[in-house]
Image (tube, rainbow, N blue to C red):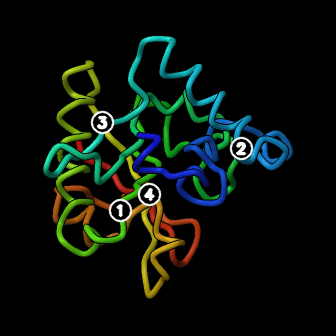
């Protein structure tokens, strides 16, 4: 994962902590502190996501876990819970540049659903973007990929950001 994310931690020192930390804490932790926070989650035992491999190297990442492991989602006006049902959330993708636009994200999403189900999840939820967006801002995935993977829109509180689910 360190090789995939590179020295900058994927996108600007995030280390996939955006949805897990309050904004001031995340900003203060950009880089090494966020990396150490992520390492602590990994070492706690429950995998915080899945990796895609090609030729023995990690080429893609998808963060997936119970929604309550992403407290920032609950504080978001746009992405607050739709109902009180237990869901797992797919919050982030990162694909190495040479592998983008080759179907890796869809494969990761399908694998994330399978993984969540193996852990007892009945509903998997995602928060993709819709419309023309630069790759750097598409880290939550695109609506089309979620639709291809069998997700349906269940709420939309913002023009370009639906909440999508697969049961």
Residue in view at x 26 percent, y 19 percent: 119
Residue in view at x 49 percent, y 82 percent: 134
The residue that disc 3 covers is: 123
Q: Residues within 10 Å of mark 4 (few under 14, many from 20)?
A: many
**In the rendered view, would you say 146 is above or below 70?**
below
Which of the numbered marks, if any, corresponds to residue 75?
2
Q: Residue 118 in the image: x percent, y percent?
A: 19, 22
Q: Nearer the viewer, mark 1 or mark 2?
A: 1
If you read the primary sequence from the N terminus, does the residue marked by circle 1 or circle 4 appear first?
1
Q: Residues within 10 Å of mark 3 (few under 14, many from 20)?
A: some
Which of the numbered marks, if any, corresponds to residue 96?
1
Q: Nearer the viewer, mark 1 or mark 4?
A: 1
If you read the primary sequence from the N terminus, does the residue marked by circle 4 or circle 3 appear first?
3
Q: Residue 149 in the image: x percent, y percent?
A: 17, 57
Label 4, secondary structure: give it. Answer: strand
Cα–Cα gap, marks 3 and 2: 20 Å
Cα–Cα gap, marks 1 and 4: 25 Å
Q: Residue 90 in the image: x percent, y percent?
A: 40, 45
If you read the primary sequence from the N terminus, does the residue marked by circle 2 or circle 4 appear first?
2
Number of callouts: 4
Q: Residues within 10 Å of mark 1 (few under 14, many from 20)?
A: some
Label 2, secondary structure: give it. Answer: helix
């Amino acid at each position: 994962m360190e090789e995939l994310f590179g020295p900058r931690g994927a996108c600007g020192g995030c280390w996939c902590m955006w949805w897990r930390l309050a904004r001031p804490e995340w900003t203060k932790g950009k880089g090494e502190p966020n990396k150490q926070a992520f390492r602590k989650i990994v070492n706690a035992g429950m995998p915080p996501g899945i990796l895609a491999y090609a030729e023995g190297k990690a080429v893609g990442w998808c963060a997936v876990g119970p929604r309550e492991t992403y407290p920032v989602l609950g504080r978001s006006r746009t992405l607050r819970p739709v109902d009180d049902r237990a869901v797992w959330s797919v919050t982030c993708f990162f694909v190495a540049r040479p592998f983008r636009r080759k179907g890796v994200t869809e494969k990761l999403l399908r694998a994330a659903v399978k993984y969540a189900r193996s852990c007892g999840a009945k509903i998997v939820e995602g928060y993709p973007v819709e419309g023309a967006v630069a790759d750097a801002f598409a880290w939550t995935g695109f609506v089309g990929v979620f639709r291809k993977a069998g997700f349906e829109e269940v709420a939309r509180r913002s023009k370009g950001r639906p909440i999508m689910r697969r049961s």
